[in-house]
Amino acid sequence: MDPSAIDQIRLNFSPQSILAMNIVIGLMMLGVALELKLEDFKRIFLSPKAPVIGLGAQFILLPAFTFLLTLIIRPAPSMALGMILIAACPGGNLSNIMTYLARGNAAVSISMTAVSTAAAIVMTPLNLALWGSLNPSTAVILRRVSLNPFDVFTTIVLILGIPLATGMLVSGILPSLAARIRKPFKIISFVIFIGFVTVALSANWQVFLKVIGLVAFVVFLHNALALNLGYWSGRFLGLGERDVRAVAIEVGIQNSALGLILIFDFFEGLGGMAIVAAWWGIWHIISGLTVAGFWSRRPV
């Protein structure tokens, strides 16, 4: 199959389904926020070195190097824009447990999750607009959809900002309630989200099977780049082993669910973007657990 044919794929949802998907992602973020506390933000100011290095790798190095990677490997334009969008997203909600399994610094991971989720309200639309417009092949798509960064900002506020503030408020005022509902929130919303992805892919299953080899290769390279950027930026700037592990996993585990929402909301389910984001959501779990398993057997 001609790799450029992936640009013609559309994973279509009804407006009602897209609204439901936005709500599900909001609930997933609420589940994450129920585990966050104000102290997680304060820790940045008390011990700033590791989180600041990690956030720099997350929002500056990863989008920039992803842009360079798209110029080098030259995937189909929609796949390239999907890679840039994933790189612009904050850390995923599985990074904290993977950091714990890897014997990394969980406090650094939690702090980065908290701050990157809040910062994504501005940094995700900014990085998508900046790096997407610099690549000639992806700039065409941005112009075609007339992407307004403010519209992306508004959507992210609704599905990240409000759940983040609500979850932290509930956690601070009603900690016992937050402790009881955080796990069901995360599990149920995650299962429903996987259902949405499955339905979207099943409608184009034969095409998906034809392109999955190419997509898997691209996502493998991209995810390896993210993990290595996190690891070696920390190493180069003198972080300890536990901090380096936390930063590497935080940068390597991206919130692909947010990416999918933006793809359906603003790019009409553009196939290359959607399949990259969906496969990233599967692959980063595999790679994250593999890295965590390897590090769990290595001395700190």
Image: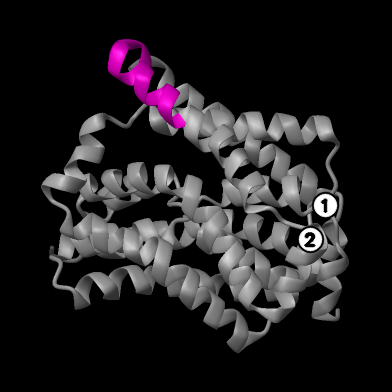
> What residue is pinned by disc 2?
271
**Image check: 116 left or right of 79?**
left
- The residue carrying pointer 2 sits among few (fewer than 14), some (14 to 19) or many (20 or more) residues within 10 Å by Cα, namely many
Identify which residue, 195 or 9, lies in the foreground: 9
Can you say which quadrant of the picture contains the N terminus? bottom right
Q: Is residue 171 magenta?
A: yes
Residue 213 at least partly seen? no
Identify the residue at image location x=28%, y=49%: 109
Circle on res. 11: 1
Secondary element at image label 2: helix
**What's the amino acid at mark 2?**
Gly
Q: Is residue 183 above or below residue 54?
A: above
- The residue carrying pointer 1 sits among few (fewer than 14), some (14 to 19) or many (20 or more) residues within 10 Å by Cα, namely many
Residue 197 at least partly seen? yes
Q: Earlier in the sequence, mark 2 or mark 1?
A: 1
Identify the residue at image location x=65%, y=71%: 133
Circle on res. 29: none
**What's the amino acid at mark 1?**
Leu
Q: Is residue 248 above or below residue 31?
A: below
Can you say which quadrant of the picture contains the C terminus? bottom left
**Image check: 55 left or right of 266?**
left
Identify which residue, 86 or 212, lies in the foreground: 86
Cα distance, mark 2 to mark 1? 6 Å
Secondary element at image label 1: loop
Look at the magenta stretch and give its main secondary structure.
helix
**Image check: 272 left or right of 230?**
right
Identify the residue at image location x=48%, y=49%: 122
Per the rendered image, the range of residues in magenta is: 164-178
Q: Are marks 2 and 1 in contact (CB under 8 Å)?
A: yes
Q: Is residue 66 magenta?
A: no
Identify which residue, 130 or 120, lies in the foreground: 130
Measured as percent of width and height from the top left, residue 70 is found at 61, 80
